[in-house]
Image (cartoon, coloured by chain):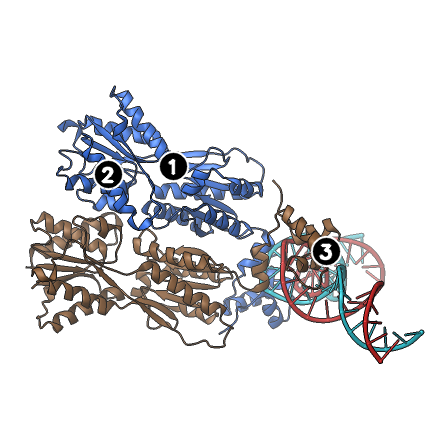
Chain colours: A brown, B blue, C red, D cyan
Amino acid sequence: MRQKPTLKIIAKELDVSVSTVSKALRDSKEISDETKEKVRAFAKLYNYKPNNIALSLKNKKTKTLGVIIPEIVHHFFTTVISGIEDYANSHGYNVIVGLSNESFDKEVINLEMLANGSIDGFIISVAKETLALKDYHHLFETIDQGIPIVMFDRVLDEIICDKIVVDDIATSRKAVQKLIDSGAKKVGIITTEDYVSVGRLRTKGYVEALQFNNINLDENLILKIEDNNKPQDELLHLETQIKNYLKHNEIDAIFAVNELYAITAMKAARELGYSIPQDIQFVGFTDGVLSKHAFPPLTTVSQHGKAMGSQAAKLLINRLESTDETEDENYKTVVVETDIIERETTLNSNES
Amino acid sequence: MRQKPTLKIIAKELDVSVSTVSKALRDSKEISDETKEKVRAFAKLYNYKPNNIALSLKNKKTKTLGVIIPEIVHHFFTTVISGIEDYANSHGYNVIVGLSNESFDKEVINLEMLANGSIDGFIISVAKETLALKDYHHLFETIDQGIPIVMFDRVLDEIICDKIVVDDIATSRKAVQKLIDSGAKKVGIITTEDYVSVGRLRTKGYVEALQFNNINLDENLILKIEDNNKPQDELLHLETQIKNYLKHNEIDAIFAVNELYAITAMKAARELGYSIPQDIQFVGFTDGVLSKHAFPPLTTVSQHGKAMGSQAAKLLINRLESTDETEDENYKTVVVETDIIERETTLNSNES
DNA sequence: TTTCAACACGAAAACGTTATCGTAGATTTA
DNA sequence: TAAATCTACGATAACGTTTTCGTGTTGAAA
């Protein structure tokens, strides 16, 4: 095991001062060509690379981004991370990820752990529990410490910072409209409880689409999935709620606010004897593996997670590298486009 | 924006020396209770937290683990990461992830970027390209620098380090045996090319299982999927290869070395008029979302990715914290158990 | 009274960098 | 020849910690 060479070691070996070595390697004009050549050769030979930690301490910049998400075993979040990584890496930044597991406490701990010098800025999608508790002190504090935050997906109006979102309301309207255009008369929605903002907004879009088409809103057609605390039978719990919902309502189309709800509803519908899409149509949200490989392949709205990720990284890095305090305080919230990917759970509009 | 307090600032404010503040906060007995109290109160008031970077520099330990994987948009890898995070976090470590995108160059860059002080050790699953090139100099070099590596999933015999693997051969044997026990006479395998070690090993297990049951090996039943360089139509490419394979062979069971191959094969089989599992049975590898929500739900072998992840983190952290050089050099390779999760693409053994 | 611990604290070094400033000797300018 | 200017380098401080080693007061022991 060979120990990593440092400036000091090189300096001693070459019998010059540390400053000379540093300057030579940075091609300072204070150093003669002769000395530069000697130092460079030696550095190359021993594979010298400057120590990142020392640089971070000196520059007060770590060149790393902290990403805090509720869950990593989730296609949407991984596409976002992938987008962040791409952009960050190609701009000389590293990415360190923290998982909140939807827990407020873990979110706070992660934030604080990373805020003590480990990272230059955060990209974050807050935990459900944080949403429910409405306790945002940790976010305020890190911003107050001068660490910029970019929020995505689950964003908070109360926090003033850059944000990356999809236009949930408009997208949801678009999805429901698609269903209506394809001949659906009784469109239901499977959504989350209202404290999850994306759920609330998508429900709103659903309502708006109905109004726009002069369809009376039937509250029974809105299924808000209750969270289950026991993750083991989460899925079972979900299924029974949906089956119950399907049995007690006459529905010919469903808009589900995420992939899992859509897939599970399709399974339930099949078991109840519906055929898809003839008897009942489906549109999901988030274009993940599940949608693509579902049976039949699910028509869904694509959130373009990768684009969201790289947008987030871009915004954050721009802010970090803007000549501090110059043109700041004008926080942007960029809304990324969504598309409906038509697959086989919806009828063609002209077939209706 | 309030700037973060440092020892120096606290010291000045309280009119004591930096050392006194440091000692007081670390509860040194050199400091009087009175002073300790004063310092603690002040530190608490201003929410003092020691700067991680400075600590890292001083201690030559960063308390962070570098994880390098080929792809993050992949269920297996995310479960592994999740296991790593869990264990690491609860032991005071952070995790910084690097994506190689299956590219040798990106793997090398990521490794070097992180090896310069940013992390204490690596957990890595090498890129396909690295496997194909058989160029491991970057791995040797980081080990040579005294940075420990734990390899998982795709491991290399040539590298001497801790390893986490599943027993691919045995598991594959078990899966094929299951198919045979359920009455299959003509079992095929859909696998990767041989340079991907997991593919090679699983193929080997397949062959062994046939031998064990005195079934003649028909080379035509082994489909090795060729990699496609154009990621856009990767899926299409896969489908045509599989359909072709199904058309030209008489097969009543398929063992696929990953989820995607299995799902795609099921789709192809359905399109060719097979019914599952009556006409053709399927077993996949890796228990991901796809398997669980496939139609019909796919019988598959579970790799327990989360367990692999936490095992990897445990091995790495143990090595990092073992009183250096004392009991080292005895590298372990732990093999984690696999299970076959029976769902609806296989017949019951007694139905045969 | 002298001597000596014990006590409570401060100074300084170290981790690996970079940047500012100083300066000895060589060279040019007046 | 004296003065000014380069040239090429070294010393030092600084980033925020922790730790080792002093050291000036006490109070107690001799």
* Chain of the residue displaying label 1: B
Dot 2: element: helix
* Residue B3 visible in the shown view: yes
Q: Amino acid at mark 3?
A: Thr
Task: Read off the chain for label 3.
Answer: A
Picture quadrant of residue B324? top right
Residue at (34, 62) in percent of width and height: A308
Which residue has dot 3 on it? Answer: A35
Tell me, for residue B196, which label it has, or none: 1
Residue A253 drawn at (x, y percent): 11, 59
**Residue B315 at least partly seen:** no
- Residue B348 in the figure: left or right of residue A304: left
Q: Secondary structure at mark 3?
A: helix
Say left or right for B300 vs D22: left
Q: Judge if badges 3 and 2 mark residues of a common chain.
A: no
- Identify the residue shown where x is 6% and y is 57%: A248
Residue occupied by mark 2:
B242
SS at mark 1?
loop
Describe residue C5's horizontal placement relative to residue A119 as left or right: right
Label 2 neighbour load within 10 Å: few <14, some 14-19, many 20+? many
Q: Position of residue A280 (x, y in %)?
A: 9, 56
| Chain under numbered label 2 | B
Q: Amino acid type of disc 2?
A: Ile
Q: CA distance from mark 2 to mark 1?
A: 19 Å
Rendered residue at 36%/41% (across/down) = B307
Indicate the quadrant where residue B245 lies: top left
- Single out the mark in the foreground, 2 or 1: 2
- Considering only vertical position in the picture, is A283 above or below B125? below
Q: Position of residue A49 (x, y in %)?
A: 59, 52
Q: Quadrant of the C terminus of chain B?
A: top left
